[in-house]
Image: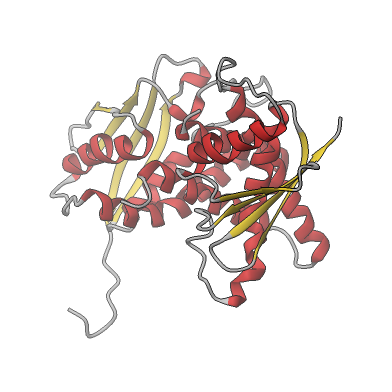
Amino acid sequence: LFVMADEALFQFLHNEVIQYIYKSSEHGEMENGRCITKLENMGFRVGQGLIERFTKDTARFKDELDVMKFICKDFWTCVFKKQIDNLRTNHQGIYVLQDNKFRLLTQLSAGKQYLEHAPKYLAFTCGLVRGGLSNLGVKSIVTAEVSVMPACKFQVMIQKM
Amino acid sequence: MTNAELFTLTYGALVTQLCKDYENDEEVNKQLDKMGYNIGVRLIEDFLARSSVGRCQDFRETADVIAKVAFKMYLGITPSVTNWSPAGDEFSLILESNPLVDFVELPDNHSSLVYSNLLCGVLRGALEMVQMAVEVKFSQDTLRGDNVTEIRMKFIKRMEENLPAGDE
């Protein structure tokens, strides 16, 4: 099947976490921002945990680009069973990771009216990437945007420490 | 890194968040059960699509399917089915290992927390969608110092299928 059972289970959990974070909140921009932050922070802790379990042997990267390639290939494959489709960088600390069929968006309907909800489904993953990078010694800010479902772009801005 | 860890870690982050949001363990347990229920009512469709398991003839068959097919499929473990009540309406699932609790330790001030309570809700919600009302609870928990983790399931009643008037 296109989506393996264990992946489906995670997706159900992810959706339910989003519902939970949002259900007790009020509407409005400030509250939405708080919810996004909560989701992102949860993802951050999970991302850290995932990398923590990764053996040190294999975690030898020669430079920042190497780290980002690891995120695009190994990390993305572990979490989403596919690689990032396209990686771009300005070689000055900004990377754009494009996933043409982001697994956590495929359950959302493609209509334009659902686009406003897409950020809720990206926040956790932004945190995941930021957390993973953090445990690889890279400090970053990660944002995401959707233009056409289910494709999305994650932007990673490396922070000099 | 494995995908199973993603679920386990996410679940841990959820429990941590709930413990922040709610004042006592009972509230957290309730919330986990509710969330599990919401997942269960959707998971059942996913399960039926994947497993091509037919309608179970009785509660014993249900127990076997839950342990040998569903748990295996979603969590990669096969609990054993034991401790049947004489009436055949209650049984235990014994989990030698619980994937949800890898690397988890309960802090001292959460002695009433049923960490994996989501599972109870999932089972309850899933079975409700196939017209079975059940009670599910943890009777033993390795996180609380027990040797094994035991989930007790009790059949309450068969539910009527809600068919719109005029359908077969």
Scheme of image coloration: secondary structure
Nearest the camera: B140 or A82? A82
Q: Residue placed at 38% from the left, 40% from the top?
A: B136
Q: Quadrant of the C terminus of chain A?
A: top right
Whether residue A61 is visible: yes
The residue lying at 68 percent from left, 43 percent from top is A127
Residue that sits furthest to the bottom in the current view? B166
Q: Residue at x 67, y 69 (%)?
A: A116
Q: Measuring 22% from the left and 30% from the top, which residue is drawn there?
A: B84
**Is residue B117 something that shows in the picture?**
no
> In the picture provided, is A101 more to the left or to the right than A121?
left
Name the image quarter holding residue A99: bottom right
Image location of residue B25, percent across then percent down: 63, 35
**Looking at the picture, does residue A67 appear above or below residue B142?**
below
Q: Is residue B131 above or below residue B124?
A: below
Describe residue A82's horizontal placement relative to residue A37 as left or right: left
Is residue B12 found left or right of A106 in the rendered image?
right
- Number of labels in the image equals 0
**Horizontal and vertical percent for residue B142?**
46, 19
The percent position of residue A121, horizontal first and vertical second, equals 61, 56
The quadrant in which residue A71 appears is top right
Question: Is A124 rendered above or below residue A31?
Answer: above
- Farthest residue toward the left? B57
Q: Nearer the viewer, residue B2 or A31?
A: B2
In the depicted view, which residue is nearer to us: A84 or A146?
A: A84
Say left or right for A47 vs A150: right
Residue B20 percent coordinates (x, y): 72, 38
Question: Which residue is most to the front?
Answer: A91
